[in-house]
Amino acid sequence: MERIERVNATALVVNSVKAAIQRGELKIGDKLPREYDMAQELGVGRSSLREGIKILNAYGVVESRQGEGTYIVDNRAKNFFEFMGFLPSGENMVNFLELRRVIEVGNIVAIYDKLTEKDFETLERMVQKLCDDQFLEDYVEADKEFHNYLLSVSENPMVIQVNNMITAMRSELLNRLFQSETVLHDARSAHRQILEALKRRDREACVSTVLNHIDTTIAHVKNMY
Amino acid sequence: MERIERVNATALVVNSVKAAIQRGELKIGDKLPREYDMAQELGVGRSSLREGIKILNAYGVVESRQGEGTYIVDNRAKNFFEFMGFLPSGENMVNFLELRRVIEVGNIVAIYDKLTEKDFETLERMVQKLCDDQFLEDYVEADKEFHNYLLSVSENPMVIQVNNMITAMRSELLNRLFQSETVLHDARSAHRQILEALKRRDREACVSTVLNHIDTTIAHVKNMY
DNA sequence: GTTTATCAGACATCAGACCAATTTCAAATA
DNA sequence: TATTTGAAATTGGTCTGATGTCTGATAAAC
């Protein structure tokens, strides 16, 4: 662990860990040195080290387990919503999908006339993949890919980041949803319809198809809870 | 400060402060007791208290100044974006407004057919206010009110919360923007157009007018930087 | 072979001492 | 009198050592 510019002891700890992760030196699952050793490495006291680790805990970057150690994790998405005061629950799942609907509709309006032939080819492959794939993990992957691609066209890192948070929360849900044959069928046809609307550069149809797609999902989720 | 259920010392501190804020016992600007006293009040050690305070600092709920004290603040919005890795800057202002555009467009599609006569009356008053008002602070207030009202119709706490974060970031920007007569004129006519589109329950027009409104703002901001 | 006891390792907490920044206020000064 | 200065008090920042508590592994008992 490299010592970063010192403004104060606590920030030094936070930045050192962040930097080590950024450099790929620390990966998810890695165990940090024990508090005493790490404090010495960074040249700070154990209290200051702990204060830094507490902040990283709050950010969802590490997780400390008493008697065991402190590990690198990525609970940032979860903490993102917790940060806003929301815990995952049945009701919040619907709220959460509605937020997603808002973003996906808003995004498609922003990008519907910006897609190139190359984009269409890529999207075509993704839709095809969703139709061809045989295993649950593949559906989930293909579904995510399609939506993430549309978001990425915005070329707006903030929009993409917010979407990442939502996608991370959605993974678990998708795994359950795609166990239903109906949902899978809906998704296949919906993605194709969205793509067709995009190809026609028909904004109104884009909005309708995206809206429909997610509303269907919401209806399914409401049935689940 | 009331002692909350104790799972562990640090969480106790965090929850106690949060609860006191929720109860309105602590307001923005209030000063917390000095660390030693507060630790005794809550029955925890000073180190544990400090770890809790550090978490609240990370959340943007309090701010500690050496030699002075610890105060209740609300930097949650700022920290929210910092958490996502974004610092306020000229370029990020545009990204940030584009995120806002995505959300406002997505939201108007979600609510355009849900407004009642009463809603229209309220919105009408708000548009009128924006036109009548004479002072900068009033414009800014009226503009915020209009957009927040539309978001609130969604009745989705997550959407509203994300909007709150954005609104908080936007305040500073609006103060500068509304110093331009052109921007003010644009805003007045844009808000009226949006309201008219809503009254006609014309989704396509809603999307167009909202899109236009924020695109105009983005253009102005681009000129500013 | 399974269960239980013990022990080492690691985080959790507390207390005390000292450091550093800020504020306060009274004394010195112009 | 008004201003400057500087020392003391206040408060958060940091370090250290001792002790508590939880977990996992190993050894002992059955």
Image (spheres, coloured by chain):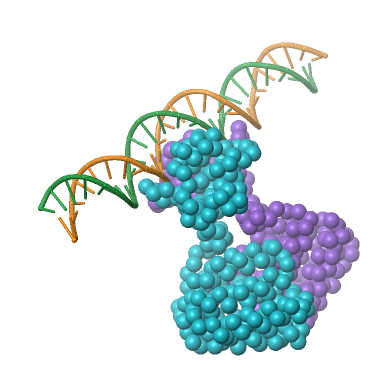
Chain colours: A cyan, B purple, C orange, D green
Residue ID at (52%, 37%): A41
Whether residue B186 can be seen here = yes
| Residue at image location 47% in from the left, 69% down from the top | A89
**Viewer can see residue B35:** no
Q: Is the residue C24 above or below the residue B217 in the image?
A: above
Q: Quadrant of the C terminus of chain A?
A: bottom left
Q: In the rendered picture of this protein, how many numbered marks are placed on residues?
A: 0
Task: State left or right for residue A115 relative to residue A17.
Answer: right
Measured along the vertical axis of the image, is residue B37 above or below residue A21? above
Q: Is residue D20 left or right of residue A138?
A: left
Question: x, y percentage for residue B108?
Answer: 70, 76
Q: Residue at the location (76% across, 54% down)?
A: B89
- In x, y percent, where is residue A122? 68, 78
Quarter containing the N terminus of chain A? top right
Spot occupied by residue B121 in the image (x, y as percentages of width and height): 72, 76
Say which of A113 and B147 sits in front: A113
Question: In the depicted view, which residue is nearer to us: B210 or C18?
Answer: C18
Quarter assignment of residue A2: top right
Looking at the image, which residue is at 71% across and 86% down? A197
**Residue A169 appears at what percent x and percent y?**
54, 68
The furthest residue to the right: B181
Depth check: give the residue in front, A148 or B162: A148
